[in-house]
Image (cartoon, rainbow, N blue to C red):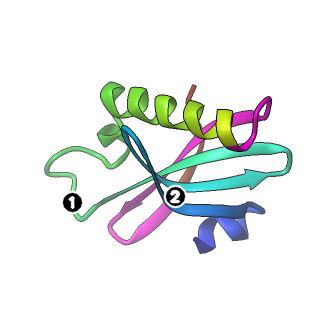
Amino acid sequence: MRLLEDSGYAVIARNVRLPGGEIDVIARDRDVIVFVEVKARASARFGSALSAVDARKRRTLRAIAADWLQISAPGATARFDVITIENGTPRLHRGAFA
């Protein structure tokens, strides 16, 4: 993802499937592993792209990230970011949820 790379991230993997779901992007931002959810909306008719990352989705992402960290980067510091794309404009939300 160009937005992530332009923001100084190193993309580790894309579309990572683990039992329980998928993580869109796993990246490194300095010494932090970042799990990135990407949400796009053509219009606000059904809410914003950011609001689509609801409590259920956050819970799923946390569980998948915990599994990935346990296997691939035990002890690493992690963060959850969201990239929203609304009206064709991407926006990075750092630390979107804990």
- Report the residue marked by disc 2: 91
User: Which quadrant is home to the C terminus?
Assistant: top right
Position above or below: 33 against 10: above
Residue stretch in magenta: 72-91
Asked whether residue 38 is drawn in magenta, I would say no
Q: Position of residue 62 (x, y in %)?
A: 50, 30
Decide if residue 55 is in sight here.
yes
| Viewer-nearest residue: 90 or 62 | 62
Q: Quadrant of the N terminus?
A: bottom right
The disc labelled 1 sits on which kind of residue? Ser
Q: Confirm whether residue 96 shows in the render.
A: no
Q: Residues within 10 Å of mark 2 (few under 14, many from 20)?
A: some
Q: Position of residue 84 (x, y in %)?
A: 43, 55
Label placed on residue 94: none
Q: Nearer the viewer, residue 79 or 40?
A: 79
SS at mark 1 in the image: loop
Q: Residue at x 75, y 40 (%)?
A: 73
Q: Which residue is mark 1?
A: 43
Question: What residue lies at 40% left-to-right and 41% top-to-bottom?
Answer: 19
Task: Relative to 60, say whether 13 is above or below.
Answer: below
Q: Would residue 94 appear left or right of 16 to someone viewing this image? A: right
As measured in the structure, the alpha-carbon distance from the residue carrying label 1 to the one carrying label 2 is 15 Å
